[in-house]
Amino acid sequence: MEVDIASEAFRDAARRVSLHTQSTDEDLDYVAQIAALAIAGAGRNRLRVGERIPYTKVAAASRAQAIRVAIRADDLEPLFRLPMTLAPQLRIFLFPIDTPTIHTASFIQDDAACLFANSTGKFDLLACARELGLILALTSRKPQLPIANIQPRSIQSLQGGPREHFCENFAGDLLIPARGLAVALQQVRKSLASKRAELGDVELLYIARIFGVNFLAACRRCERAGLLPPGGGAALAAHLRDNFGGAEARADQLGIPAAPNVSIPSAGACALQWLHDSVRRGEIAIDDIATATRTDPSFLGSMYAVGRSLGEFS
């Protein structure tokens, strides 16, 4: 598929997304150009999802476990390296974007897909995992038309139907597996010398930072595990907001170590890795990649030369 055709396919798909209306045309054009390059030069980077994935909690848990196996992560490891494993292990490439209105996005064309995450602030691991769940679920349905998903910055909630809840459950199970949650809680409660039977806000603040998610996501994971009553997380979040200025402020007051920063390559580097076969064949120019990803072409050219010398690019 030619780059301009793929770019228009993204725009057409984006117009069908009800949430994209808060995104500016400039932001959509920026993401569209990267998506177009990625899909046009996908080459061997094709997804193999398998059978159709139902939007159920059981399916979300089993698919999350399958992803951990695929990226060689055990059930105790916090997945701060998730962005770096998407391309080599799952054939889904993550592109950082600096748009002011788009938080995360994804694009699916046939059996190729790419994911976008905003890089202007702290990397949102939970949003990345939600978008991954969406890509897997939609690709398993073998869509006839290109699909774009745009997640604006201002909307970060569970509003939606079965698909949105599947993505939320998948992300929670992927980032906080049951065994990892059990071991982490045991260690936290031991260090706090907690004797209470029920979970408190302090334990949950630790869990959130250990696994790199927000407080409500940690609470929802515990609710699904039967460790909190339904709605308990929302009540605890309100308590922290009303009395301490919010969950993050309370965690800082308690001196709970912050989650490590998640590092990801530049958009140009990601695109070059995705498209190296097409670059080698002369189908896509490095200058085109630089323009689409707002990257210095001389930097990409140097990186490509080094990559070839090291055998990273054939």
Image (cartoon, helix red, strand yellow):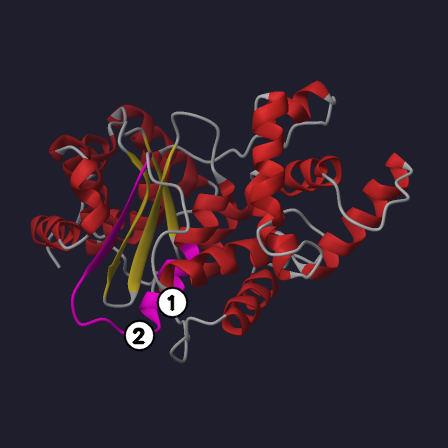
Q: Secondary structure at mark 1?
A: helix
Q: Which mark is residue 137?
A: 1
Classed neighbour count for the residue bearing mark 2: other residues with Cα under 10 Å, few (<14), some (14–19), many (≥20): some
Q: Secondary structure at mark 2?
A: loop
Residue 152 in sight here: yes
Residue 151 magenta-highlighted: yes
Q: In the image, is 307 to the left or to the right of 221?
A: left
Q: Are marks 2 and 1 in contact (CB under 8 Å)?
A: yes
Residue 100 vs residue 47, the one in the foreground: 100
Residue 294 vs residue 286, the one in the foreground: 294
Q: In the image, is 304 to the left or to the right of 23?
A: right
Give the answer, above or below, for where 30 lies relative to 158: above
Classed neighbour count for the residue bearing mark 1: other residues with Cα under 10 Å, few (<14), some (14–19), many (≥20): many
| Percent of width and height locating residue 85 | 51, 51
Cα–Cα gap, marks 2 and 1: 7 Å
Q: Residue at x 63, y 56 (%)?
A: 223
Disc 2 marks a residue whose amino acid type is Arg
Residue bearing the label numbered 2: 141
Q: Residue at x 91, y 44 (%)?
A: 195
Q: Which residues are magenta?
A: 132-153
Q: In the image, is 154 to the left or to the right of 196?
A: left
Q: Residue at x 75, y 40 (%)?
A: 203
Disc 1 marks a residue whose amino acid type is Ala
Residue 79 in sight here: no
Give the answer, above or below, for where 123 lies relative to 13: above
Give the answer, above or below, for where 205 lies relative to 81: above
Q: Residue at x 8, y 50 (%)?
A: 8
Residue 62 magenta-highlighted: no
